[in-house]
Image (cartoon, rainbow, N blue to C red):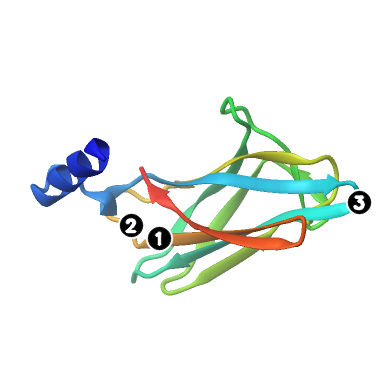
Amino acid sequence: MRLCALIAILVGLGLVDFSRADRLIFPQFVSGELNGVRNSTRIILRNNGVQPETGQIQFLGSSGEPVEVMVGGQAVSALPYSLQPFGTLDLRTDGTGPLTSGVVEVQIQNQGATSLEGSLIYEVLGARVSVVSSPL
C-alpha cells in the first residue's frame, strides 16, 4: 500500500514520467507443453502515437536470463518489432516444446516519449488470463 502511495505522489508531482519509459514489462508468460496440453502466450502491442515505434521483445527466465520459446515454428529468445503510427502487433507463442515461464520485456528503441502500450494473454491448461504491461 505504501509503494502505491509513493508512486501516486511521485507521478502527481511530475517526478516520474511513464511516457518516457524505455521498456514495457509483462511480469509473467508461459509457453510449451505440459502433459500433452499446449500453454501459449499472446502479446499485443499498440502504437497509439504518430511516430513509428521500434525495438525488441525478449523472453527472460526468472533470473533474467534469455529463454527460448517457439514462435512460428522457430525457437527464439528475442524478436525485433516495428510498428507504424497507430499500428498493432499480435504475436503468439506456439505452445510447443518444453514448458517455459518467465518475464517478457519489450525494449523501446525510440528516445523520448513513447505511445507504445501492450497486453499479454496467456492460455494455461485451457484457461485464458490477460495481463497489462507495466512501464519502466
Q: Position of residue 61 (x, y in %)?
A: 63, 32
List the single residue furthest toward the top. Answer: 63
Q: Which residue is mark 1?
A: 116
**Which residue appears at 82% of the width and 55% of the height?**
38
List the single residue furthest toward the front. Answer: 1
Whether residue 11 sits left or right of residue 98 in the image: it is: left
Q: Position of residue 102 (x, y in %)?
A: 62, 38
User: Tag 2's secondary structure?
Assistant: loop
Q: Which residue is mark 2?
A: 114
Q: Tag 3 or tag 1, which sits nearer the N-term?
A: 3
Q: Which residue is mark 3?
A: 36
From the image, state whether disc 1 or disc 3 is nearer to you. Answer: 3
From the image, state whether disc 3 or disc 2 is nearer to you. Answer: 3
Type of amino acid at the residue the image marks with label 1: Leu
Q: Tag 2 or tag 3, which sits nearer the N-term?
A: 3
Q: Are marks 1 and 2 in contact (CB under 8 Å)?
A: yes
Q: Position of residue 81 (x, y in %)?
A: 56, 56
User: From this viewpoint, is residue 112 visible?
Assistant: no
Separation (CA) of disc 1 from disc 2 = 6 Å
Whether residue 124 sits left or right of residue 85 in the image: it is: right
